[in-house]
Image: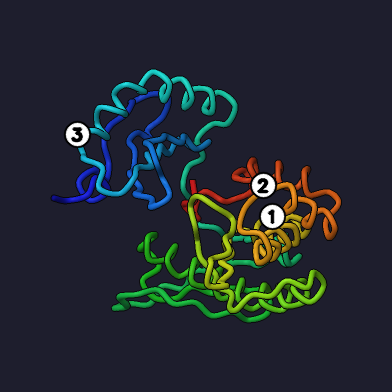
Amino acid sequence: MQSAAKQLSLFSVSEEPDALSGFSVRESSRARRLSIKVYPRGRVEVVVPKRTRSRDVQAFVAENQAWIRKTRAAFAAKHAPEPFRLPVRINLRAIERIFGVVYQPREGARTVRYRLNGDILSLYGKTDDEAQCVVALKRWLAATAREYFEPRLRGLSALTGNSYKRMQVRGQKTCWGSHSSTGTISINYCLLFLAPAALRYLMIHELCHARYMNHSRRFWRLVGRFEAQYRRLDRGLADSWKAIPTWVGLY
Protein backbone atom coordinates (compact mmCIF):
# COMPACT_ATOMS: atom_id res chain seq x y z
CA MET A 1 0.00 0.00 0.00
CA GLN A 2 1.33 3.41 -0.93
CA SER A 3 1.73 5.95 1.84
CA ALA A 4 -0.60 8.93 2.04
CA ALA A 5 2.29 11.27 1.25
CA LYS A 6 2.91 9.48 -2.06
CA GLN A 7 -0.74 9.23 -3.00
CA LEU A 8 -1.78 12.75 -1.98
CA SER A 9 0.78 15.23 -3.20
CA LEU A 10 -1.73 17.98 -4.00
CA PHE A 11 -5.49 18.34 -3.64
CA SER A 12 -7.77 21.29 -4.13
CA VAL A 13 -8.84 23.06 -0.95
CA SER A 14 -10.24 26.39 -2.05
CA GLU A 15 -10.16 28.71 -4.99
CA GLU A 16 -10.29 31.72 -2.70
CA PRO A 17 -8.81 34.08 -1.63
CA ASP A 18 -5.94 33.49 -4.07
CA ALA A 19 -4.55 31.06 -6.58
CA LEU A 20 -2.37 29.23 -4.04
CA SER A 21 -4.91 26.47 -3.56
CA GLY A 22 -4.11 22.93 -2.63
CA PHE A 23 -2.33 21.08 0.14
CA SER A 24 0.70 18.90 0.53
CA VAL A 25 1.03 15.87 2.79
CA ARG A 26 4.08 15.20 4.95
CA GLU A 27 4.59 11.96 6.85
CA SER A 28 6.22 12.29 10.25
CA SER A 29 7.55 9.53 12.48
CA ARG A 30 6.82 11.78 15.46
CA ALA A 31 3.20 12.50 14.57
CA ARG A 32 0.59 10.72 16.66
CA ARG A 33 -2.42 12.27 14.94
CA LEU A 34 -3.27 14.21 11.80
CA SER A 35 -2.79 17.97 11.88
CA ILE A 36 -3.06 20.88 9.46
CA LYS A 37 -0.83 23.92 9.17
CA VAL A 38 -1.72 26.94 7.06
CA TYR A 39 1.19 29.17 6.10
CA PRO A 40 0.86 32.94 5.69
CA ARG A 41 1.37 32.85 1.93
CA GLY A 42 -1.37 30.31 1.41
CA ARG A 43 0.37 26.93 1.48
CA VAL A 44 -1.49 24.22 3.38
CA GLU A 45 0.34 21.23 4.81
CA VAL A 46 -1.20 18.12 6.36
CA VAL A 47 1.12 16.27 8.75
CA VAL A 48 0.25 12.61 9.18
CA PRO A 49 1.63 9.59 11.06
CA LYS A 50 3.39 7.00 8.93
CA ARG A 51 1.16 4.55 7.04
CA THR A 52 -1.87 6.84 7.20
CA ARG A 53 -4.40 5.90 4.53
CA SER A 54 -5.08 8.44 1.80
CA ARG A 55 -8.84 8.25 2.34
CA ASP A 56 -8.34 9.18 5.99
CA VAL A 57 -6.35 12.24 4.95
CA GLN A 58 -9.05 13.27 2.48
CA ALA A 59 -11.73 12.89 5.13
CA PHE A 60 -9.69 14.89 7.64
CA VAL A 61 -9.17 17.75 5.19
CA ALA A 62 -12.84 17.72 4.22
CA GLU A 63 -13.82 18.02 7.89
CA ASN A 64 -11.56 21.04 8.31
CA GLN A 65 -12.16 22.87 5.03
CA ALA A 66 -14.11 25.67 6.71
CA TRP A 67 -11.21 26.34 9.09
CA ILE A 68 -8.68 26.18 6.27
CA ARG A 69 -10.64 28.71 4.17
CA LYS A 70 -11.09 31.03 7.14
CA THR A 71 -7.39 30.90 8.06
CA ARG A 72 -6.19 31.45 4.50
CA ALA A 73 -8.61 34.34 4.06
CA ALA A 74 -7.36 35.94 7.29
CA PHE A 75 -3.77 35.74 6.10
CA ALA A 76 -4.69 37.12 2.65
CA ALA A 77 -6.51 40.07 4.24
CA LYS A 78 -3.37 41.08 6.12
CA HIS A 79 -0.78 40.15 3.54
CA ALA A 80 -1.56 40.15 -0.14
CA PRO A 81 -0.06 37.18 -1.99
CA GLU A 82 3.30 38.14 -3.45
CA PRO A 83 3.95 37.42 -7.12
CA PHE A 84 6.95 35.26 -7.91
CA ARG A 85 9.95 37.05 -9.35
CA LEU A 86 13.62 36.25 -9.47
CA PRO A 87 15.74 38.55 -7.28
CA VAL A 88 18.13 41.23 -8.52
CA ARG A 89 19.19 42.06 -4.96
CA ILE A 90 19.54 39.74 -1.97
CA ASN A 91 19.92 41.05 1.58
CA LEU A 92 21.39 38.45 3.94
CA ARG A 93 20.82 40.25 7.24
CA ALA A 94 22.32 37.52 9.41
CA ILE A 95 25.77 38.08 7.94
CA GLU A 96 25.21 41.76 7.14
CA ARG A 97 25.87 41.50 3.42
CA ILE A 98 23.88 42.58 0.37
CA PHE A 99 24.42 40.96 -3.03
CA GLY A 100 23.43 42.06 -6.49
CA VAL A 101 22.24 39.32 -8.86
CA VAL A 102 22.79 39.32 -12.61
CA TYR A 103 21.52 36.78 -15.12
CA GLN A 104 23.68 35.80 -18.09
CA PRO A 105 21.95 33.56 -20.66
CA ARG A 106 24.14 31.21 -22.66
CA GLU A 107 22.88 29.67 -25.86
CA GLY A 108 22.59 25.90 -25.75
CA ALA A 109 22.99 25.67 -21.97
CA ARG A 110 20.86 23.11 -20.17
CA THR A 111 21.55 24.09 -16.58
CA VAL A 112 22.16 27.19 -14.48
CA ARG A 113 25.36 27.73 -12.53
CA TYR A 114 26.47 30.54 -10.26
CA ARG A 115 29.65 32.51 -9.74
CA LEU A 116 30.33 34.96 -6.93
CA ASN A 117 32.62 37.94 -7.46
CA GLY A 118 32.67 40.18 -4.42
CA ASP A 119 29.09 41.26 -3.83
CA ILE A 120 27.88 40.31 -7.31
CA LEU A 121 26.26 36.91 -7.79
CA SER A 122 26.14 35.87 -11.44
CA LEU A 123 23.81 33.16 -12.68
CA TYR A 124 24.71 31.90 -16.11
CA GLY A 125 23.41 29.28 -18.48
CA LYS A 126 19.75 28.50 -19.09
CA THR A 127 18.59 31.57 -17.17
CA ASP A 128 15.23 31.73 -18.96
CA ASP A 129 14.29 28.69 -16.84
CA GLU A 130 13.10 30.21 -13.55
CA ALA A 131 12.99 26.85 -11.76
CA GLN A 132 16.64 26.15 -12.56
CA CYS A 133 17.59 29.66 -11.45
CA VAL A 134 15.93 29.04 -8.09
CA VAL A 135 17.82 25.75 -7.72
CA ALA A 136 21.10 27.57 -8.37
CA LEU A 137 20.21 30.35 -5.93
CA LYS A 138 19.44 27.77 -3.23
CA ARG A 139 22.77 26.04 -3.86
CA TRP A 140 24.47 29.37 -3.30
CA LEU A 141 22.45 30.04 -0.15
CA ALA A 142 23.43 26.64 1.25
CA ALA A 143 27.11 27.17 0.43
CA THR A 144 27.05 30.66 1.97
CA ALA A 145 25.36 29.34 5.10
CA ARG A 146 27.96 26.59 5.52
CA GLU A 147 30.76 29.14 5.17
CA TYR A 148 29.38 31.56 7.75
CA PHE A 149 27.48 29.28 10.13
CA GLU A 150 30.22 26.77 10.97
CA PRO A 151 32.67 29.17 12.67
CA ARG A 152 29.84 30.85 14.58
CA LEU A 153 28.49 27.52 15.78
CA ARG A 154 31.96 26.44 16.91
CA GLY A 155 32.38 29.68 18.83
CA LEU A 156 29.02 29.32 20.56
CA SER A 157 29.77 25.68 21.32
CA ALA A 158 32.89 26.79 23.19
CA LEU A 159 30.93 29.55 24.96
CA THR A 160 28.13 27.27 26.15
CA GLY A 161 30.25 24.21 26.79
CA ASN A 162 27.85 22.13 24.68
CA SER A 163 29.37 20.08 21.91
CA TYR A 164 28.10 18.66 18.63
CA LYS A 165 29.53 16.18 16.15
CA ARG A 166 28.73 17.86 12.87
CA MET A 167 26.70 20.67 11.34
CA GLN A 168 24.59 20.39 8.23
CA VAL A 169 22.73 23.08 6.32
CA ARG A 170 19.27 22.37 4.99
CA GLY A 171 16.26 24.21 3.61
CA GLN A 172 13.64 22.83 6.00
CA LYS A 173 10.07 23.98 5.48
CA THR A 174 8.87 23.33 8.99
CA CYS A 175 11.70 24.24 11.37
CA TRP A 176 14.66 26.57 11.72
CA GLY A 177 16.98 23.98 13.18
CA SER A 178 17.31 20.65 14.97
CA HIS A 179 19.75 18.62 17.04
CA SER A 180 19.69 14.87 16.45
CA SER A 181 20.42 12.17 19.01
CA THR A 182 23.61 11.40 17.07
CA GLY A 183 24.95 14.93 17.62
CA THR A 184 24.17 16.47 14.22
CA ILE A 185 22.91 20.04 14.27
CA SER A 186 20.86 21.00 11.22
CA ILE A 187 20.42 24.69 10.50
CA ASN A 188 18.05 26.22 7.98
CA TYR A 189 19.85 28.38 5.42
CA CYS A 190 16.82 30.70 5.44
CA LEU A 191 18.16 32.06 8.74
CA LEU A 192 20.48 34.07 6.50
CA PHE A 193 17.53 36.40 5.87
CA LEU A 194 16.92 37.06 9.58
CA ALA A 195 18.65 39.36 12.06
CA PRO A 196 22.02 38.23 13.53
CA ALA A 197 20.41 37.92 16.97
CA ALA A 198 17.89 35.37 15.64
CA LEU A 199 20.66 33.25 14.15
CA ARG A 200 22.67 33.40 17.36
CA TYR A 201 19.66 32.39 19.45
CA LEU A 202 18.80 29.47 17.20
CA MET A 203 22.36 28.15 17.46
CA ILE A 204 22.35 28.47 21.25
CA HIS A 205 18.96 26.74 21.37
CA GLU A 206 20.17 23.76 19.36
CA LEU A 207 23.46 23.52 21.25
CA CYS A 208 21.60 23.35 24.56
CA HIS A 209 19.80 20.28 23.25
CA ALA A 210 23.11 18.48 23.59
CA ARG A 211 22.39 18.43 27.31
CA TYR A 212 18.58 18.28 27.30
CA MET A 213 16.81 16.69 24.33
CA ASN A 214 13.53 18.31 25.34
CA HIS A 215 12.01 21.69 26.20
CA SER A 216 11.92 21.22 29.95
CA ARG A 217 12.40 23.98 32.49
CA ARG A 218 16.01 22.91 32.90
CA PHE A 219 16.52 23.28 29.15
CA TRP A 220 15.12 26.82 29.09
CA ARG A 221 17.15 27.81 32.16
CA LEU A 222 20.25 26.66 30.33
CA VAL A 223 19.29 28.65 27.22
CA GLY A 224 18.64 31.70 29.41
CA ARG A 225 22.18 31.56 30.82
CA PHE A 226 23.54 32.43 27.37
CA GLU A 227 20.66 34.44 25.86
CA ALA A 228 18.60 36.54 28.25
CA GLN A 229 16.13 37.55 25.50
CA TYR A 230 15.35 33.99 24.48
CA ARG A 231 11.58 34.34 25.01
CA ARG A 232 11.31 37.35 22.70
CA LEU A 233 13.59 35.79 20.10
CA ASP A 234 11.76 32.47 20.18
CA ARG A 235 8.41 34.21 19.62
CA GLY A 236 9.95 36.23 16.81
CA LEU A 237 11.06 33.13 14.93
CA ALA A 238 7.46 31.96 14.71
CA ASP A 239 6.58 35.09 12.71
CA SER A 240 9.79 35.35 10.71
CA TRP A 241 8.26 33.90 7.53
CA LYS A 242 7.76 37.50 6.41
CA ALA A 243 11.50 37.93 6.05
CA ILE A 244 11.86 35.03 3.61
CA PRO A 245 11.57 36.08 -0.06
CA THR A 246 8.85 34.46 -2.13
CA TRP A 247 11.35 33.02 -4.61
CA VAL A 248 12.85 30.79 -1.90
CA GLY A 249 9.57 28.89 -1.82
CA LEU A 250 9.59 28.23 1.94
CA TYR A 251 5.97 29.28 2.28
Residue assigned mark 2: 237
Query: How far apart are labels 1 and 3 at the CA level?
Result: 39 Å
Q: Is residue 211 above or below residue 161?
A: above
| Disc 3, SS | helix
Q: Are marks 2 and 1 in contact (CB under 8 Å)?
A: yes
- Please tell me how crowded label 1 is: few (under 14), some (14-19), or many (20+) other residues with Cα within 10 Å: many
Let me know if residue 91 appears in the view: no
Q: Position of residue 5 (x, y in %)?
A: 27, 48
Write the residue at 38% across / 52% down: 29
Kindly identify the amino acid type of the residue bearing the numbered disc 1: Leu
Residue assigned mark 3: 55
| Disc 1, SS | loop
Write the residue at 33% across / 44% down: 25
Write the residue at 63% across / 74% down: 120
- Please tell me how crowded label 3 is: few (under 14), some (14-19), or many (20+) other residues with Cα within 10 Å: few
Query: How far apart are labels 2 and 3 at the CA level?
Result: 34 Å
Kindly identify the amino acid type of the residue bearing the numbered disc 2: Leu
Q: Which mark is residue 156?
A: none
Of the numbered discs 2 and 1, the one sitting upstream in the chain is 1
Kindly identify the amino acid type of the residue bearing the numbered disc 3: Arg
Numbered disc in front, either 2 or 3: 3
Residue 214 is left or right of residue 19, and the answer is right
Numbered disc in front, either 1 or 3: 3
Q: Which mark is residue 194?
A: 1
